[in-house]
Image: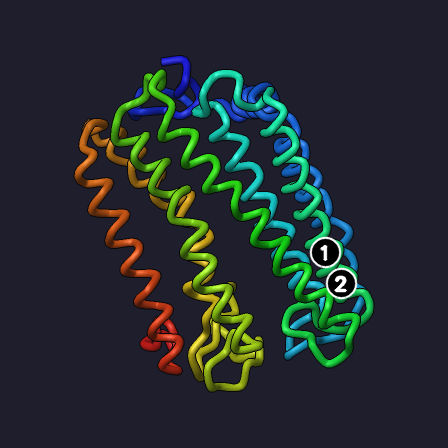
Amino acid sequence: MADTALIPLDRTQRFSPTAAWQRMQRDEPVLTATALLLALLVVPMLAAAMIDPRLHLGENIWIKPIKFAVALSVYTATLAIFARFLPAGTTATRWYRLFMASVIVAIFAEQAWIGGAAALGTSSHFNVDEPVWRNLYSVMGALATLLTTATAIYAWQIARNGALTIPPALKAGLVWGLGLTLPLTLVTAGTMASLSGHNVGGSGMATEGLWLMGWLRDGGDLRVAHFFATHAMQFAPAFALGLSWLGRPDTTRAVHIFASGFTLFVLGTFTQALMGRPFLAVIG
């Protein structure tokens, strides 16, 4: 199957990073280059974090732009991988090129805003004390919505691609994952914006957060639901791919059930945060 040459459908197939990179460059060179550039931006910001002792909410001020660069790199790389499942010729159309150009502009504008705020020693998100930063926050919110709409466009195009030769379960996983990302992200991110923060109760300090992720332990944290919402585009396809590895590539019903359960899980963590309760409270 040409469409899945670099996505092993069983344990006997081998994955080649070099071949995968070449395939990404061939299928979606602009998104692939964007993912690489964002990954490379992490290097100077890591260096800045090591020499700049400034803190914001108990965390080194460069951690946030580093996290966003990694997240946006993963986002664009995922889209570049999924580009092979679009109808033939889609990436060469004028509407697609113009749309994707606007998405990439939005991505780098977001990264410049977050990195610039760090360099100036201030907050990017929820910074509404001064007119300039308040206006920037509104503009960046619109751009964040724009860049996330790429998942909906991909879901729509893959769903209508009748020429795909991939197992139905994998196609369902792609469509579900990409299709859920935008609405779930709008709900979680929109709520954080309306509340002017991610914490519901608690200190809001990163020093009180869950290891690695930094999610609050002394109150509700809306970033938990937001994280899982934005990564629906990876979770659902990964589940479908797992079915293929287990020798059940045509079990679409299981994918539908997983997608429904995943949606309930995101909404559950969202509700938990709104109630002021920490995620995985038993960890402490």
Question: How far across and down, in percent of the image, does residue 271 sit?
Answer: 34, 73
Question: How far across and down, in percent of the image, does residue 207 sit?
Answer: 57, 78
The image quadrant of residue 283 is bottom left
- Label 2: how many residues lie within 10 Å, few (<14), some (14-19) or many (20+)? few
Between 126 and 228, the residue placed more toward the observer is: 126
Between 259 and 159, the residue placed more toward the observer is: 159
Q: Which residue lies at the image location 64% right of the left edge and 69% below the top edge? A: 125
The residue pinned by badge 2 equals 50
Q: Which mark is residue 133?
A: none
- Quarter in which the N terminus is drawn: top left
Left or right: where 79 falls relative to 168: right
The image quadrant of residue 179 is top left
Q: Secondary structure at mark 2?
A: helix
The residue pinned by badge 1 equals 46
Amino acid carrying mark 2 in the image: Met
Residue 9, compared with residue 118, is above or below; it is above
Report, in whole angstroms, how far the alpha carbon at label 2 lies from the one at label 1. 6 Å
Between 11 and 136, the residue placed more toward the observer is: 136
Left or right: where 209 falls relative to 169: right
